[in-house]
Amino acid sequence: MYRTTGIYIKNNKISKYKEIVDAGVPEVVYIPLDRHVGAPAKPVVSKGAEVKIGTLVAKADETLSVNVYSSVAGKVVETDDKLITIKTSEDIYEKSIDTSEGIITEIPDSKTLILEKIRKAGIVGMGGAGFPAAVKLDIPETCKIECLVINGLEGEPYFTADNRLMVEKAEEIVIGARIINKLLGIQNAIIAVDEENKDAVKALVGVTKRYIGVNVKAVKNKYPTAAETQLIKKLFNVEIPKTKLTRDFGYIVHNVGTVYSIYNAVMKNKPLYERIVTVSGDAADNPQNFLVRAGTPASYLANKAGSIDNARLLICGGVMMGTEISDVNTPISLLDGGLLMFKKAKKDTEASPCIRCGRCSQNCPVHLQPFEIADRLKIGDTPKLYKLRPSDCINCGICSYLCPAKIPLLDFIKMAKEQIR
Ligand code: SF4
Ligand code: SF4
């Protein structure tokens, strides 16, 4: 069972009111093939191939894998198992993509067609999970879905990308919800929004008045409410046991960015090759929300919000769940909601020994003992490590955040998960 507690964390949503701007096209993109949960996609283009925006560059290799599309027009300069490198040229789109500005409201009748469009477009869970959306929406007959929950809570302290998406693309999101409603045979979607994000609530409520079957719920965002099971507990007071899926209890949860991508795939034939990314942190002179092509190097994006030379610490993803990067060419993937730049490197605040205060274990939403996992990992006690269940960790980062000794517990737990695997 999950705890119902969670913590209130200090928000730094300094880019909250910044409109989405196009980050543009870097000289080179490095498109990742392995950021989703399943096997890496298999390249279908070779060195020297000319591609357009929306060209299929790698094919799903098994059920949990997804198709990968080019985010730019240009020439392929290198391919390997993990990346396709493309030197960019002037934007040219695949003819099949509808690039018009207008909003399309008429949803296709065929559920098979809708699901196939989502599958073909390579849509993954954009809240960071990377689970293929088509697999999640292919519901077995034994499951009766009652409600679609759209997660717009965006728990990471600096992130504002989803908030801006809800403000600026409210109608597309609501239509995206209706597409999923149709697929699931229901008329009951709830968009959960942080009550602090009043502009997003207002935009969505305004649109839902014109569409049946989609409602907005403003909730207090206690971290990690944005995690699926915590959100279901918050909204319906239903506990989802670890051994079960939300669909076993009648709920399907999708991130708001995923729903927007589903709208684009079904109504505009647009595969997934770009997303909204917040670039923020104290080293960013102008924190902003950017529309970013998949594979854009972190350095290019950081320089759009300031100067990468001012940053001694770069984090891809958020301060709670993200990963520190040392290679400034690390590509931004479709799962990264933010790139954070800080003036102070982590080694400036070195960890001290554990004082056994218990804050990490008392506040872990899935009842783990992070300090014990870190200790067992350090001495290589794999049998005990296995019993401590690091694979149950939902990567929320609360343990690292609360630790007074500044021990990077989440990093240890990620390593422990690898070791168990
Ligand atoms: S990161 Fe994992 S171990 Fe740490 S508090 Fe969150 S769920 Fe628990
Ligand atoms: S929070 Fe940090 S200091 Fe406290 S028990 Fe956990 S690891 Fe040790």
Image (cartoon, grey):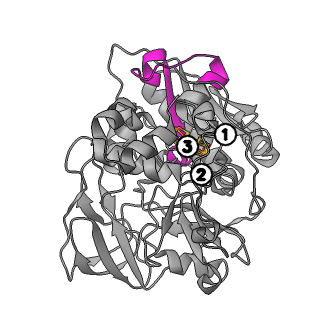
- Between 387 and 196, the residue placed more toward the observer is 387
**Distance (Cα) linking label 3 and label 2:** 6 Å
Name the residue carrying label 2: 320
Q: Earlier in the sequence, mark 3 or mark 2?
A: 2
**The magenta stretch spans which residues?**
233-260
Residue 420 in view here: yes
* Rendered-image quadrant of the C terminus: top left
Please say if 207 is above or below 319. above
Which percent across, then down, holds residue 268? 46, 53
Residue 154 in view here: no
Name the residue carrying label 1: 223
Q: At x 77% / y 40%, what residue is drawn?
A: 206
Which percent across, then down, holds residue 168? 69, 55
Assess whether mark 3 and mark 1 are in contact (beta carbons under 8 angstroms). Answer: yes
| Residue 98 tag number | none
The amino acid sitting under disc 2 is: Met
- Between 359 and 205, the residue placed more toward the observer is 359
Which percent across, then down, holds residue 29? 39, 76
Assess whether mark 2 and mark 3 are in contact (beta carbons under 8 angstroms). Answer: yes
Q: Earlier in the sequence, mark 2 or mark 1?
A: 1
* Crowd band around label 1 with a 10 angstrom C-alpha radius: few (<14), some (14–19), many (20+): many
Is residue 143 found inside the magenta-colored segment of the image?
Answer: no
Determine if the C-beta at disc 3 is less than 8 A from ligand 1.
yes
The amino acid sitting under disc 3 is: Cys
Q: Earlier in the sequence, mark 1 or mark 3?
A: 1
Name the residue carrying label 3: 396
Secondary element at tag 1: loop
